[in-house]
Image (cartoon, rainbow, N blue to C red):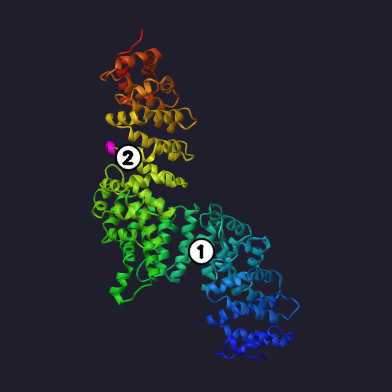
Amino acid sequence: MVSVAHPFMDVESCRSYIDELFSPDQRKCLEALVCLKNTVIGSNRQKGSVIAQGVVTRLTQLLQNVSIPTDIRVEAAVTLGSLAKGTESHVKQLIDFGIAPLLLNCILSNDDPKLTDVCLRCACSIFSHPQAPYGLIFQEQQTVSHLLKLAMQSVSNQICVTTILSASCKTLEHQMLLCDQGAIYTLAALLCSPHYSVLMPTLNCIANLAYQNANVSAIIATASFGGVSVPDLLVGLMSRDRPSEMQLASAKCLTYIHRAGAISAEDSKILYKTLPCLVVLCKKDHTCEERVVAAETIAYLTEVNTDLQRLASISNQLIPTLANMLHSQSEANNNNNVHLDPCVIADMKQAAFRAFASLGANDEDIRKRIIETERLMEEVVCGLEDPNDKVRLAAVRCLHSLSRSVQQLRTTFLDHSVWKPLMGVLQGASDDLLSVASSTLCNLLLEFSPAKEPILESGGVDLLCSLTHRPDPALRLNGVWALMNMAFQADQKVKSQILHKLGTEQIFRLLSDSEVNVLMKTLGLLRNLLSTKPHIDQIMALHGIQIMQAVTLILDSNHSADVKEQALCILGNIGDGDSAKEFIMSREDILNKIQEYMTHSNVKLQIAAIFCISNLVWKEESGAAERQAKLKEMGVYRLLQQLIMTSDTLLFDNEILKQKLIEISKDGVED
């Protein structure tokens, strides 16, 4: 009979057992393994001591030695499995010893069910570690297919295989490989298991397979077992008599399948099952962990669909429920004097902010109800200054969503001076945080926002100009966009500050940007800078040559009609100046371009070119006769007459344009 170590015996006091692991006597070796196994069970200190003494190497040697009795290999695997149930540090050390490929090799190459079982259990612990070499699962196709076959042999195998595959499915390629090997149909069968311990990793695996993968989600949505489709099986697992964590995992699966486009938002499984289930799971009678996942899943489910946002916002007091998650520590103190872990509080806040950001993304009424929720804006402002990066990011996303409300920008946002903490967030933030914060700043800089002036005074121009130099296109776009908003109807001082800080060289770089949105907003910035006659003349006097070069660059390029329309509108603004007009009139190449676009096939370009001519020849302005004469000589008025006679209904849908055509052609009618 194999001896058993005393439960209080530590590894240091049974050194002889460790020595006997190397004994050629297989009986002694087996006894030593059993002793060692019983010593480390339940004790992380003992596990750490065994690993530190280098015993793992001997255990792996025994496990892979096919010439020794299977019971020794089994005990070695069981001991390794026990060590793998220690701390994350212990598991990482086992990974560094190379235990993962060894376990997979044993699983694939041996025929003993017991050895396979204990190796699977150990592998389950190893591959659940965040730094596990999960790529090994997908190196050879037969690995996945063999694991799926094993999953049908026992409940223990089902638990381990689904856990391993779920933890290892990280990329689009992994999802496709699992799908190609038939994993979906195995998982569909396992959804009918009576065992909770099988169902949970199965649900997690389905969620990981479906996430942001349209092709795989479409297959999941049509797969079935026993004549029941996978979506219907998932709905069944959301019933109220199921454990709440199972309901949550099922709702998460359906959410991912929907967001991948395989189930529509109007489907009753989403409208009347998934969404209500998630709303209920946000309630206070569920664990903090469940509430966090439920709120985050609601955020993802409703992120892009206005109808789901509206339905969620009126479902079962969701908005007050999410607000309670922001006050979680206060609620705990008031109810039972329980202090929540700071990490749990941070997770609760992050999840609630993310849900609010999605709910308020499109609908003004929802935004109003969110903002008017008691203490909500105070929590958002505090969130902007939270020491936790994830909370700050979620709070900024929430603020960005709420900042789309014109009314709230003028009232609530002003009352809470949200620009102050937002400017603080922008200092030294990560790119992710900077992207959302600068998008929010774009909204706060709209002409009607009272925050515009204080942002300017607190160094907003310098910050935004610096964003236009960033390698991330989204940050460049936000920087230019915010400057464009800042320049709209601004006074000369602000415009000069923007031009001075940004510099014409950087404007040229932005006009050559590979991202067309950056180019468009840069042209929009130039349009806003070149507005109001005195401003136009002053800016052109200082930067006219460079600005004309920039406009010429765009008009001579192969950019789209939308881009060229913006360039022509800038010329139209320049033509509205007094002295600035000469920058156009002195350039025959520019005049020829304008004339060319007057007869362009694109009506938008025609309209922009005609407004250019209109501003150049307006008869009430000084020098109009000379300009009219020059344009008449070029044949511009002949073109105007032809356009008046046009049958192009699109062109004459614009009544203002029609009147302008008639007025500016009156003084230049040619025989």
SS at mark 1? helix
Q: How many marks?
A: 2
Q: Amino acid at mark 2?
A: Gln
Q: Which mark is residue 233?
A: 1
Can you give x and y, in whole percent of width and height, for residue 397 in the image?
37, 54
SS at mark 2? helix
* Magenta extent: 490-498
Image quarter of residue 378: bottom left
Quadrant of the frame with the C terminus: top left
Mark 2 sits on what residue?
Answer: 497
10 Å crowding of disc 2: few (<14), some (14-19), many (20+): some
* Residue 497 included in the magenta stretch of the image: yes
Image quarter of residue 105: bottom right
Image quarter of residue 389: bottom left
Pick whichever, 454 or 114, lies toward us: 454
Pick whichever, 615 or 361, lies toward us: 615
Q: Residue at x 40, y 14 (%)?
A: 635
Quadrant of the frame with the N terminus: bottom right
Q: Tell me how far mark 1 sits from mark 2, CA to CA.
A: 63 Å
Q: Amino acid at mark 1?
A: Leu
